[in-house]
Amino acid sequence: MGVNATFWRTLIGLYYIFTLVHTAVSTPPDDPVKCVSGNMNCTVTNSYGAFPDRSTCRAANVAYPKNEAELVSVVAAATQAGRKMRVTTRYSHSITKLVCTDGTDGLFISTKFLNHTVQANATAMTLTVESGTTLRQLIAEAAKIGLALPYAPYWWGLTVGGLMGTGAHGSSLWGKGSAVHDYVTEIRMVSPGSANDGFAKIRVLSEITTPNEFKAAKVSLGVLGVISQRSLTYTMKNDSDFEDQAVTFGKKHEFADFIWLPSQGKVVYRRDDEYPSTHRAMVCSIFCPSVHNSLRR
């Protein structure tokens, strides 16, 4: 009797383990771009399913270039027609509305199929990849030639172009810094051009040949234009009036934040404000999506 009971308990236990293993399956987000008909009349969202203001971003159509030549053609046609273009990635992870085209007549350019490794150089310790390459793909490709990326965000679904443009980062304990773009050595970028350029041109930017443009392009938020500088200050205070200060502090600063340390009886207040428009810096002209990026360990 005891043997049978033990047998059935073991069998039931294995059943539950087997069930858990087969039901705990994670899946990546859906394609952020949805169109009513083919590639026409499209909307885009992020991997969270909604932007902070719950608005819907629309465009007349979306393009999915598969190589640089197709990308140049797409940018040229849109430039000649005077259309607004924004880049969307495979999962469009950004919380903010960087992908919105301001209106319904714009064009989404997806880097979904621009996800190939162009060159791997173990001697120079560099990888050249297309901007739609995900962080997971990048790490895997680097491992094949014995390299590793020192810093990276937590989620592997970010693309190289996306994490560069938004300044995505990891730890900051050593090396050049915590941001992935700190390890980029060259960017190949397709930008709008004049009629003499065929309305699109390819720029090759590097820290050696074009340092100013290169720095601007590395964290461009998708466009190079007016960049707001920021003032960021941390202050630690006693938490005795934290309950009252939480709302008051939040109303005083544009991007207020705080960290409560109850075990220490302290609160770290972060004041994050934009500089006034008189302190804004103008950089270069408007660029389109980056295509190839070289990353160094």
Image: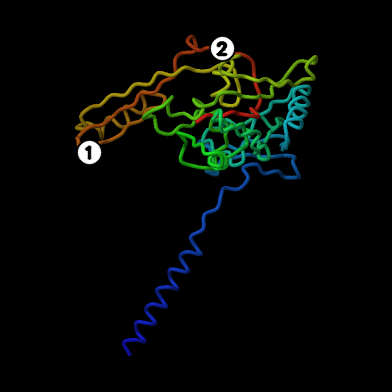
Q: Please identify the quadrant where the N terminus is shown.
A: bottom left
* In this rendering, position of residue 150 left or right of residue 266: right
Name the residue nearer the viewer: 46 or 103. 46
Amino acid at dot 1: Pro
Q: Residue 33: image x %, image y %?
A: 65, 41
- Name of the residue lying farthest toward the bottom: 1
Left or right of 265: which side holds 15?
A: right
**Callout 2 environment at 10 Å: few (<14), some (14 to 19), or many (20+)?**
few
- Above or below for 265 versus 8: above
Residue occupying the far top of the picture = 278
* Label 1: how many Cα within 10 Å (few below 14, some 14–19, many 20+): few
Query: Which residue occupies the foreground of this view, 120 or 99?
Result: 120
- Residue at the spot 64% in from the left edge and 33% down from the top edge: 119
Q: Which mark is residue 40?
A: none
Residue identifier under label 2:
282
Which secondary structure lies at badge 1? Answer: loop
Position of 189 compared to 267: left or right?
Answer: right
- Front residue of this view, candidates 42 and 223: 223
Q: What amino acid does circle 2 point to?
A: Met
Measuring from the top left, give residue 284's x and y in whole percent.
61, 13
Query: In this picture, is 211 found above or below 247?
Result: above
Query: Residue at 25% of width from left, 32% of height from top?
Result: 242
Q: Residue drawn at (56%, 42%), measured in percent from left and top? A: 144
Q: Looking at the picture, does residue 50 appear above or below residue 255? A: below
Q: Is residue 262 above or below residue 292?
A: below
Element type at marker 2?
strand
Q: Is residue 32 visible?
A: yes
| Residue beneath disc 1 | 262
Position of residue 19 in the picture relative to residue 137 (left or right): left
Residue 264 falls in image quadrant: top left
